[in-house]
Amino acid sequence: MYIKEICLEGFKSYATRTVVPGFDRFFNAITGLNGSGKSNILDSICFVLGITNLQQVRASNLQELVYKQGQAGITKATVSIVFDNSERSRSPLGYEGHSEITVTRQIVVGGRNKYLINGKLAQPSQVQNLFHSVQLNVNNPHFLIMQGRITKVLNMKPPEILSMLEEAAGTRMYETKKEAALKTLEKKQSKVDEINKLLDLEILPALEKLRKERTQYMQWANCNAELDRLRRFCIAFEYVQAETIKDNATFEVEQVKAKIAEIDDIAKSTMVDVKAMETKIAQLTAEKEASMGGEMKSLSGTVDTLSQSLVKETSVLNNKEDTLRSEEVNKEKIVRNIEELKQSVEEKASAIKKAEEGAADLKNRVEELSKSLEEHEKEYQGVLAGKSSGNEEKCLEDQLGDAKKEVGSAETELKQLKTKISHCEKELKEKKNQLRSKQDEATSVENELRARRKDVENIKTGLESLPYKEGEMEALQKERESERDCVQKLKDEIRNISAYLANVEFSYHDPVKNFDRSKVKGVVAKLIKVKDRSTVTALEVTAGGKLYNVVVDTESTGKQLLQNGNLRRRVTIIPLNKIQPYVVTSRVQVAAVELVGKENAEIALSLVGYEEELKKAMEYVFGSTFVCKTPDAAKKVAFSSNIRTTSVTLEGDIFQPSGLLTGGSRKGSGDLLRQLHAVAEAESKLSVHQSRLSKIEEKIAELLPLQKKFKDLKAQLELKSYDLSLFQSRAEQNEHHKLGELVKKIEQDLEEAKSAVKEKQLLYENCVKTVSSLEKSIKEHDNNRESRLKGLEKKIKSIKSQMQSSSKDLKGHDNEKERLVMEMEAVIQEQASLEQQLASMRTQITNLSSEVEEQKSTVAAARNNLDEAQSELNAVRQKMKECDKEISGIVKEQKKLEHKLSESNLERKRMENEVKRMEMEQKDCSVRVDKLIEKHAWIASEKQLFGKSGTDYDFASRDPGKAREELEKLQAEQSGLEKRVNKKVMAMFEKAEDEYNDLIDFGSIFSTLLPGTMAKLEPPEGCSFLDGLEVRVAFGSVWKQSLSELSGGQRSLLALSLILALLLFKPAPLYILDEFIVVSLKEGMFNNANVLFRTKFVDGVSTVQRTVAKQNK
């Protein structure tokens, strides 16, 4: 097993997908400048092998293995190694049947770490066991020599050297498992005693079992020869039998064919007789039909018709008579019920009338009492409160006090108003004299103010005539900023999504000068537009890897790109002029629509949009698959005999006509097309917003001069308005203006005071009258108060008792009246319903009576007609019986001949089947003979001995049947022994001995590298080899006590000898030397390498270029 190819993506400095193919199985070298990514390739191998000490790959955590630790938009690192596993003897356990093994490890920033073996998820322990089984333990490696580690080998302690040897021998994996088992045993210390007892009980039986196995192995080895001899004897007998059957089958087939010909002759003559009888029967039948058939058929039909008609008419008559009788009985019942209901209605109406009369009198009485009670109670409350009547709100004393207060208030206000009027008349006279003296000054100020107002109006008119509105420029600028933000956001969105779509970016250099780039159409995924987003997963599964294919116009363009386009990755090119697409035929499409419906199954091609010139490429990618809504529809389309076309569900499950089903978890499926769709939408929105932005910019440029003019006019307006307001405020502050305003105010106050004096005078006189009236009423009320209260109390009590009695009687009358009304309405309704039924029933009885009479006459006529037809039919039947008797005799004779003919046909078919069986048997024997000769080459050389006496193939002296039984018995015994026998015991012993002898090569290798020396591995003094091993060196015959006596070069050669001895003992699939012995830039390294990989650091990303060295052999 050795490395064929490494694929890195997002690992350390390899940001994009980088494939390092074509590893030589013997010697590869990697060269490049410092920092170009040489060691990162070796780190990627250690990463896949499952290294746990990340310091050896120059990282402190797994996230540092991702390109720029995930800061550049790449959030995962993936490394895949393809191993050649063609050498089965060195294959990992359980993978002997795989010619290639692909191991992938992937880490995601902030996510999980996963392994894949041949594309299937695997546990880390499964991957470790795979590598440990071929001596690739990266955490204790003898195959991996990192920078500066070669000299550390000699500084290892004895247990460490022993550990390295165990790793090389392949036992370290089991030692690791042993250590894990011992740890488990420590946790189960409580069961140690019990385990010891079990060991004591099982050791002796195990030894006895080993002895039996040894005996069985010897028995198995001895029986193999006898088994081979018997097997040859049985195969030879089978061969001879097959040859005999093949030779005899031809003669027997000819005999059977002759018998078949004889049967055919007899059958022909019998058929002639049968046909003659059929002709005679047909003649007799025709004669019978001609003479009596038509008449018989006509009479039978007439009798059947008349009989059915009679039964029908009789049944109708009986039904009508029964109906008539039942209707008459019902009529009598309804008449009696109507009479009873009429009497009941009259009684109810009389009772209701009496109840209404009594209730009306009582209701009037209650209303009168209620009104009287309310008036008396109101009057009583007024007398108690000292009022003259119950309608007043205050008592008389309160009313008198309020009236006196109003008189005093009105008198005071009247005096104040008269004083104010005299003061205002005096002040008004003085101010008018002052105002006349300031008239000239006021005229000049008014003229100036009018001129300034006219200037302001002129500027306002100029502003209004401008085609510019205030705030219009600011709104446009705000809108421009908004559109710029949208454009920037959409550009960022496109940039972010495009970072994840590196695989669909196709970049190339012009292969020739003045190359027409329109010939290269682009990647398929970017040339389509998904019509329905729900189908993206199905379409991505349908297209598969074809989504990344590149479409060009001709094959010559594709050839130029591949040869001179400097492509960064491997691509598949679709030339439009050469591609031969397969499209589902219209017949199959119609069959699918009829089977599951048009909406449930559509050609994938119809679900994507594309340019017409790309039609052939799109048919090649999407034209041969149906996209179905449900798994049931997909299953029907794929497996229907009329369709048999691959179908994909919306969830991405694939149904193929061959029966292969693909499905399950598709995490992330459809992301590519969904992201491309999002990019297309974002680009469309971006173009719209950019168009809007350019229009806004143009409009802003147009409005700039208008805005400037508007601002100038507005500034002038503000200045003139401010000047006008200042002048107006100064004008209002001069003496004339102030005096004018003051005169107006005094005149207004004077008028208001005069009108107020008139109102207050009237109010004062009214208040005086009210006071005198109230004083008189108080005197009268005090004289008769007590007598009025007692009389009102008696009246109130009497009215309340009368009211209670009347209300009770009224309620009883109302209830009785309601009950009687409801009962009468129900009776009237029932009476009306019965009268309607009675009228309907009388009409029906009249109709039924006339119908019954008519039906009776119809039945009598039908019975007479039936009797006449029946007598005619009986006469014709008698004649036909005589004719049928003659025909039946001929038919019996015909059936006998047909029976004989069918038996002959059965015999013929049996013989034909016998012929087919013989021919098949002959063919099978021929095939069996050929297969036996092909399978057993010894038959050709020994077949002349088959059946000869005195040979191993003497069939006469030995019964082949018994030999077959002996063979089967012996095979069963051998099969049982083979399962129980450990056939590898001797081979394992020999292999261990050879490996021990190979290990002795350590000393000879060191002697070759450094003549005159010797080296060996031995346990430390006083210890066994299980406690560890240490390296001993001799110069001549003198063994050195310590390795510190050796020079640096001697120590390096000693360590190299140990590594090479381990390689000879049990080679690992690969050896990695990182800057070992010679640095990567020295010619000694890459001149001797079969394959050389050169690393470069370009634009922040490592790249790899492969070179094959010229070999002189």
Image: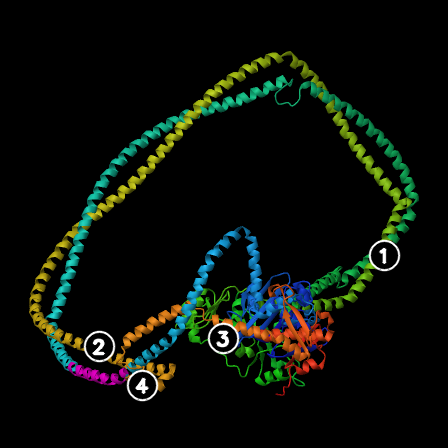
Where does residue 164 sit, x and y in percent of width and height?
Answer: 62, 68
**Residue 958 location (% of width, % of height):** 27, 78
Disc 2 + disc 4, Cβ < 8 Å = no
Q: CA distance from mark 3 to mark 2?
A: 52 Å
Front residue of this view, candidates 640 and 190: 190
Image point 49% across, 54% down: which residue? 197
* C-alpha distance separating marks 2 and 4: 40 Å
Residue contact between numbered discs 3 and 1, judged by CB atoms under 8 Å: no
Q: Residue shown at 50%/71% (left/top)?
A: 988
Question: What is the quadrant of residue 1073 in the picture?
Answer: bottom right
Which residues fall within the magenta stretch? 244-266
Give, as a three-letter code, the residue at label 4.
Answer: Leu
Mark 1: amino acid = Leu
| Disc number lying in front (1 or 4) | 4
Residue picked out by circle 3: 623
- Nearer mark to the viewer, of 3 and 2: 2
Instruction: Kindly report the distance in space between the C-alpha atoms of the residues bearing marks 3 and 4.
Output: 64 Å
Q: Earlier in the sequence, mark 3 or mark 2?
A: 3
Circle 4 — which element?
helix
Which residue position is annotated with label 2?
910
The way the protein has been coloured in the rendering is rainbow
Query: Element type at marker 3?
Result: loop
- Left-right relation of 888 to 816: left
Q: Earlier in the sequence, mark 2 or mark 1?
A: 1
Distance of label 2 from label 1 (alpha carbons): 128 Å
Badge 3 amino acid: Gly
